Amino acid sequence: MRCGSCLPIRSLVVSLCVAWIISTSVAADEPLEIGTSPQLFADDFLIESSRHLRRVAHQAVKANDGEPIFTSGRLYGTVLYDDGKFKMWWRHQSQSGYSYAESVDGVSFETKAELSGINFAGDYTLAVEIDENAPDESAKFIAGYDAPGMAAGIAKSTDGINWTPLNDGKPVTHRAADTYNQVLWDKAAGHYKLFTRTDFGAGGGAGEVRGHRVMTNPNIHEDPTNWELVKEWIFHIHGESEKQRRQIYALTDWIYHGQHFSLMSVYEHIDDFSEGPQDKNKRHDKDVMNIYLGRSRDGASWDLSSVYAEKPLIERGGEGAFDNGIAIAASSIVTHDNKHWIYYSGWNERHGNADEPRERDAAIGLATMRLEGFYSLQAKERKGTMTTRAFVLGGDEIQINVKAVAGEVTAEIFDARGKTIPEFSGENAASLIKVNDVRAVLKWPQSLARLNGSVIKLKLTMKNAHVYAMKVNKS
């Protein structure tokens, strides 16, 4: 299906369940091949059984005392860490285009140049990625942007400043794509993904119902219009009435060691101005936008439990704050210095519409989070246990991301059938006491090297502890 030349057949509206059913191509009785990549406990993919544990969703902590780090523009754009520096693509306050800035510390940015080569249209959004499948240096960076006709365009660049549009600058999809249009290479799937907004109901303007879609293309450099629709959806669990409660405004995908996380900008209580007239100082809760985190194993079906639990990834500010009305995340997450950096744009008023316009100021903020700290398995005073599915041990060391400042974690190893291995269990179990480390090494009396290549299960017993992830390592 070539979305650039015809409208795709609309898929069924997807009523996404809060309870997330994980799909995987690995049969339950087959050992997992996890290699040496971090394995996050954000879902149950690696978990065979657990007891007396709960999964906790964590929120990012605002940097710079909650004040903006950049006031010259707005961040309907991207921050990446590349070549030893933070690189930011930010949108001008005048909505006349984009500039590029750099930073050493991730807080103080210096603008280097205005972008050239892209014919922006619509609301001017830009989502930049490093193309790991680029055929040459001319496509080190790829970007999705608003092309004429409120549709998605794609461009490439060597330096992130001077851009060359693909498809002769023409759109590669139909409307509506006037928020983030993100194109990125999914190495595990072997194709490019394109995420854009789309319409349900009226085609823009009054009665507009915002939805989202994901499409795939085997090679954008050979044919940038060869997109196949995978899924499009709206928030619809509560039926027709939900369209006034919440709509998906923008969604981008951040792939971390094979697991997908979405930064979702959710428009809430649409066109509800019951909280009063224009007021940049007051914090409102109607007609606002919040940032939520979604989870997925395929980048198409998302766990939306954070949205329905009304737990944003970044809390909007309070009275007088620059982000008390709207928060929209940058298109990606930066991982650097053992933490995640989440940049976002904040506004001090509500969304508004043509009949109820809002004057508002924009600035760019920053929030950070512990490395892999989006979700944890938590045990309180009562001990809890977790046993993994069988996996191939591809190294001689196991590390866990753990916070047990006043607690403990013990680790035992079973064979593929669930039988304990005496040298690594019972009185020989590894133990971590009062530790807070993103890469705490589990140490048994004997070297783990003798089990390298074997199929094993790991059992953790926890008390007053959070465990976020595990990782096999080759020391």
Image (cartoon, rainbow, N blue to C red):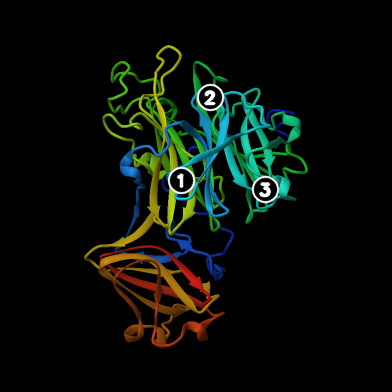
* Image quadrant occupied by the N terminus: top right
Residue 400: x %, y % from top left: 41, 68
Q: Which mark is residue 140?
A: 3
Cα–Cα span, label 1 and label 3: 27 Å
Disc 3 crowd, CA 10 A, few/some/many (<14, 14-19, 20+): some
Which of marks 3 and 1 precedes in the sequence? 3
The residue at the point 39 percent across, 49 percent down is: 368
From the image, state whether disc 1 or disc 3 is nearer to you.
Answer: 3
Residue 198 lies in what quarter of the image?
A: top right
Between 310 and 161, the one lying in front of the other is 161
Residue type (three-letter) at the residue carrying disc 3: Lys
Q: Amino acid at mark 1?
A: Gly
Residue 363 in percent (x, y) is at 41, 32
At x 56% / y 47%, what residue is drawn? 299
SS assignment at label 2? loop
Q: Earlier in the sequence, mark 2 or mark 3?
A: 2
Residue at label 1?
294
